[in-house]
Image (cartoon, rainbow, N blue to C red):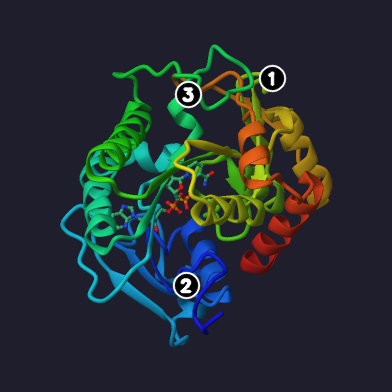
Amino acid sequence: MSPGFSSAGFSRAVVTGGAGFLGSHLCERLLRRGIDVICLDNFLTGTPANVAHLVGEPRFRLIKCDVTDFVHVPGPVDLVLHLASAASPADYLRLPIETLKVGSLGTLHALGLAGEKGARFVLASTSEVYGDPRQHPQPEDYWGNVNPVGPRSVYDEAKRYAEALTTAYRMSRGTDTAIVRIFNTYGPRMRPDDGRAIPTFIRQALAGEPLSVTGDGSQTRSVCYVDDTIRGILALAESDAPGPVNIGGPLELPVVELAKTVIELSGSPGSIRHIDRPVDDPQVRRPDITLARELLGWEPRVPLREGLTRTIAWFRSRTGV
Ligand code: NAD
């Protein structure tokens, strides 16, 4: 194998949204595999601090750019990983037009780049395309139950459109595309104020505040530690499968149990406070990962308690609590 080539033959990857939570872990992992990385981000919900430790590496370039304007990268590129998009409900609800634009125009430009360079393209889609699901767990051939005019539609429909666009490029232009449907992922570098359940619980637990559980907390979520999710995304990138493929943790847990586990692992005196459920909040969510197992030999390895312990330690190191 020549230097700079991964086992799948990639030598130079573009990661849109590379300064975000998942994107920064992805950049790190690609570099570790010997792949050059160009990280494009406008820092709307991410931050250069997430990749500051990579900036000195000769194989890494960070470029501030809004992918809804244009995407231009000189030189060869053989992999485009399109992650740019607000992803937490708190972010996309305050950035509705930006979210729709990055899902549509941003995806168009990222696909254009992949087409121009003859690169493999991977769309970071989401379990939100299943909406409030009527089928449980959710296999990839379930079409979903999304309210097109509900508040969450700015994200759900942007991703559904992005999937349609990706499929059209594959069918009509012959672009080598793949779609990964990512389920709730947690880990270091999540923003404590991003509104998602786990960082919110950890922030509150470390501050000794009550943990705010929406509704009665019986609604379920299935979560996956970031290292496992990244391994899944790369396994899909390195395959020739078009997807969509679900990547997520199949262990389903009521949200209130998640809160109790955070209280226990953080050693917090915390109690639980119930607050209103957001509009169109899904009642259940669990990936069917049969396809990922069969196609990619992928399944999560990091148990929940271990992943939470690592995440709590990271939050603690940031807050000094
Ligand atoms: P994040 O908000 O931390 O990262 C998204 C990144 O995209 C940020 O750095 C942001 O600044 C950048 N960005 C947004 N708009 C942009 C634009 N117009 N041009 C350039 N950069 C732009 O979110 P994340 O959790 O890392 O999610 C990354 C991707 O994975 C998203 O596409 C999201 O939909 C998908 N996803 C994440 C999860 C999860 O649990 N984290 C679950 C499902 C899907």
Q: Earlier in the sequence, mark 3 or mark 1?
A: 3
Specify whether residue 183 is in view: no
Q: Do the CB atoms of the residues marked 2 and 3 lie less than 8 Å apart?
A: no
Q: Do the CB atoms of the residues marked 3 and 1 lie less than 8 Å apart?
A: no
Task: Give the amino acid at mark 2.
Answer: Val
Q: Earlier in the sequence, mark 2 or mark 3?
A: 2
Label 3 CB less than 8 angstroms from ligand 1: no
Q: Badge 3: how crowded within 10 Å, few (<14), some, or many (20+)?
A: many
Against 155, residue 106 (above or below) is below
Quarter of the image with the N terminus in it: bottom right
Query: Residue visible at 63% across and 43% down?
Result: 198
Mark 3, residue position: 130
Viewer-closest of 230 and 18: 230
Q: Which one is in front in this view, the residue at disc 2 or the one at disc 3?
A: 3
Report x, y in % for residue 104. 24, 41
Query: Residue visible at 81% across and 47% down?
Result: 305
Mark 2, residue position: 51
Distance from disc 1 to disc 2, alpha carbons, whole Å, reads 37 Å
Apparent side of residue 91 relative to residue 238 in the rendered image (left or right): left
Task: Give the amino acid at mark 1.
Answer: Ser
Quarter of the image with the C terminus in it: bottom right
Against 8, residue 135 (above or below) is above
Distance from disc 2 to disc 3, alpha carbons, whole Å, reads 31 Å
Mark 1, residue position: 218
* Helix, strand or loop under label 1: loop
Q: Badge 2: how crowded within 10 Å, few (<14), some, or many (20+)?
A: many
Specify whether residue 177 is in view: yes
Against 127, residue 61 (above or below) is below
Query: Residue visible at 61% across and 21% down?
Result: 284
Distance from disc 3 to disc 1, alpha carbons, whole Å, reads 19 Å
Label 2 CB less than 8 angstroms from ligand 1: no
